[in-house]
Image (spheres, helix red, strand yellow):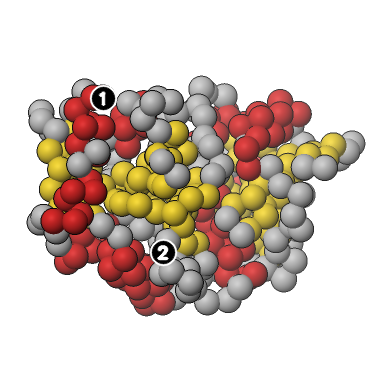
Amino acid sequence: MCAVTTREKQTVRIQFGEVCCALDCRDVDVFERLRDSFNVFLSNQPIDITVELNLVDRLDRKTLDTVPSHNFGLPHEKLEISGDHAYHVEFDAANRRLLAIAERSIFNTAFALRSLNKLLLLVYYTASRLKRPGTPPWMLVHSCGILRKGQVLLFAGPCETGKTTIARLCSEDFGLPLNDEMMSLSWPRPEDYGLLAQSAPIFGELPFRANTVAPLSSVFLLKQSQRTVLRRLGRMEAYLRFLHQVVSPAGFNNHDTRTTISIMDSFANVVTGTTPFFELEFTRDRDLLWDVEARLKELILRGIK
């Protein structure tokens, strides 16, 4: 079963690339939201890492002293989420188990589960390192993924550049939005040097996500504009801009900044060396946007820069 209920806890297993993460939660309402929200990512695979989520009315030192601790013997990590909210975290690397204590109010708003994103990113990269030391087999990129004609078009950029807008401009005629916040990208496959793209169980602004794996076709670096224009990018410009959209692969208790930066640098080099990159200026006109996308093959063949 993907979700298991007991008197003490309720568990939902989430597949995150090659990592299976178990979320334990004793709050029935929050557990049901987790199970429903992660529906397309539910898994039966063996658990690689477990997150025990304990909810309290107020997260302060007095409350923390009353919550049972695993006494992991490791320094506590505090993850700022938004405003005055935070997770108090203890991590037991030997048993691959994490205790996260959070204020219950974090989960009360319409897009409350977005507060889990930062925690999930750290959990994913931590579990990847424990499961397979070295470079993570899948890297995360701030981007919107659109499945179109059997391939994934990746629209990358920082906040407020239009990733969610791109997803909303899609329909059955133009493509299937996979995620409007973050996508997973593989390193090149040995057989054909291509990359794969897959939706990540990370929450964006849209209420839906699709869990699909497909070859990566092209990457568009977004720029909001009053016009819709596509420009082919040279490799150096693409690398410098894309590097900022790669999510740091640092996990819990990982303070090797040099290795982390090296992995991000290598990945950006690989992606920009194997995938066509474009700058896309766009308006909210759906037809104009996809008319431009239809010219991609011509632009790639001509090598326009």
Residue 167 in the image: state x and y as whole percent.
Answer: 37, 31
Query: In this rendering, is residue 142 above or below 261?
Result: above
| Secondary structure beneath label 2 | loop
* Quarter containing the N terminus: top right
* Quarter containing the C terminus: bottom left
- Does residue 91 appear to the left or right of 265 in the view shown? right
Disc 2: which residue: 194
- Residue 257 seen in the figure: no
Question: What is the spatial separation of the Cα atoms under label 1 and label 2, in whole angstroms?
Answer: 29 Å
The image's mark for residue 286 is: 1
Residue 25 location, quadrant: top right
Taking depth in this image into account, of 238 and 216 the one nearest to the observer is: 216
Residue 227 location, quadrant: top left
- Does residue 26 appear to the left or right of 223 in the view shown? right
> Residue at horizontal 51%, vertical 68%?
136
Query: In this rendering, is residue 209 above or below 157?
Result: above
Please state which amino acid type lies under the numbered disc 1.
Arg
Residue with the most extreme right position? 7
Residue 202 in the image: state x and y as whole percent.
Answer: 51, 43
The image's mark for residue 133 is: none
The reply to whether dot 1 and dot 2 touch (C-beta < 8 Å) is no
How many residues crowd around disc 1 within 10 Å: few (fewer than 14), some, or many (20 or more)?
Answer: some
| Secondary structure beneath label 1 | helix
Chain-order first, disc 1 or disc 2: 2
Query: In this rendering, is residue 171 above or below 69?
Result: above
